[in-house]
Amino acid sequence: MTATPILSARGLVKRYGRVTALDHCDFDLMPGEILAVIGDNGAGKSSLIRALSGAMTPDEGVIELDGQPVKFASPLEARGAGIETVYQNLALSPALSIVDNMFLGRELRKPGPLGQYLRMLDRPAMRKFARDKLNELGLMTIQNIDQAVETLSGGQRQGVAVARAAAFGSRVVILDEPTAALGVKESRRVLELIQDVKRRGLPIVLISHNMPHVFELADRIHIHRLGKRLCIVDPKKISMSDAVAMMTGALAPPSEALAA
Ligand SMILES: Nc1ncnc2c1ncn2[C@@H]1O[C@H](COP(=O)(O)OP(=O)(O)OP(=O)(O)O)[C@@H](O)[C@H]1O
């Protein structure tokens, strides 16, 4: 591997009582790539993502961003470092508008009548930012950005969540099962959106059980098994059934795919 990974981890361990969710797990995300993370239920994929995104503190191990060790005490700190995560539950506020959901805690403000001491929301700037970001990602089929998110379809909601992550994630976007709850047409749209985010230069970590989607999008596949990275495979050189067999332990990975 020549380039420095954008985000990497070495020897992550996380124990919950007698359960070892992460067992000396390694991870590498290279610049500009879509890295899929696949694994059986309970393999530890969510635990890995939670560690990388500051939602959980590992018991052992090191995480590096651009080759520098980082410790995230909260998701806020990871977001501050440019790592945005879209979880399955999306963390959108259904009753709020699309614009308000784009910000949620990161609202743009401007000086109010009392100057810097009472800064007020800069709604025109927020509206412009939201419109520009949705536009950049071809999401302006959403006509009205003041519309409440609860009035959007599942695919459109996923679109808003991904657009928000792409807008604020300056280094990495992590997507946890982005097409899990979507129909065929909506999934297609979200897959295109993920490609758009990649074209804008942001590397993406994609956790998915949907093998056709993984094989369509991923540049590399991290196969996770029993709390650790089993191997990394090239989706162009391996069949879906072999990847699934490795995930479940039915097939040993080829020696060149074994993780270092
Ligand atoms: N907060 C927790 N408390 C106790 N055990 C946990 C906790 N979080 C995860 N685990 C356990 O750690 C192991 C790994 O779970 P994790 O959710 O990371 O797997 P996963 O690969 O994401 O699974 P799935 O594909 O089913 O979502 C499982 O045995 C799980 O029960």
Image (cartoon, rainbow, N blue to C red):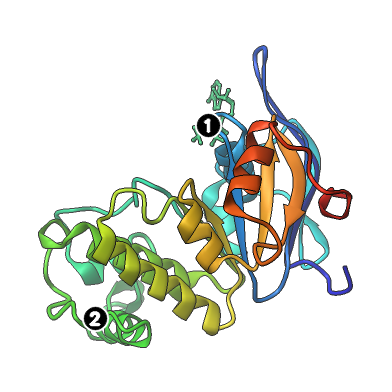
Disc 2: which residue? 113
Left or right of residue 24: residue 130: left
Asked if residue 207 can be seen in this view, the reply is: yes
Image quadrant assignment for residue 78: bottom right
| In the displayed structure image, the side of residue 142 where residue 72 appears, left or right | right
User: Does label 2 point to a residue whose CB lies under 8 Å from ligand 1?
Assistant: no
Q: Vertical placement of 18 versus 177: above or below?
A: above
Residue at image position (55%, 40%) is 46
85 lies left or right of 161: right
* Discs 2/1, front: 1
Give x and y (percent) for residue 85. 49, 56
Question: Where is residue 20 shown, x and y percent of the image?
Answer: 69, 22
Q: What residue type is labelled 2?
A: Pro
Mark 2 to mark 1 CA distance (whole Å): 55 Å
Observer able to see residue 73: no
Q: Which amino acid does label 1 sit on?
A: Asn
Residue 51 vertical position relative to residue 70 in the rendered view, above or below: above
The label number, if any, that marks residue 41 in the structure image: 1
Mark 1: C-beta under 8 Å from nearest atom of ligand 1 = yes
Q: How many residues crowd around disc 2 within 10 Å: few (fewer than 14), some, or many (20 or more)? A: few
Ligand 1's image quarter is top right
- Mark 2 secondary-structure assignment: loop
Task: Look at the picture and state if 160 lies above or below 46.
Answer: below
State whether residue 143 is above or below residue 16: below
Q: Position of residue 135 (x, y in %)?
A: 31, 86
Q: Earlier in the sequence, mark 2 or mark 1?
A: 1
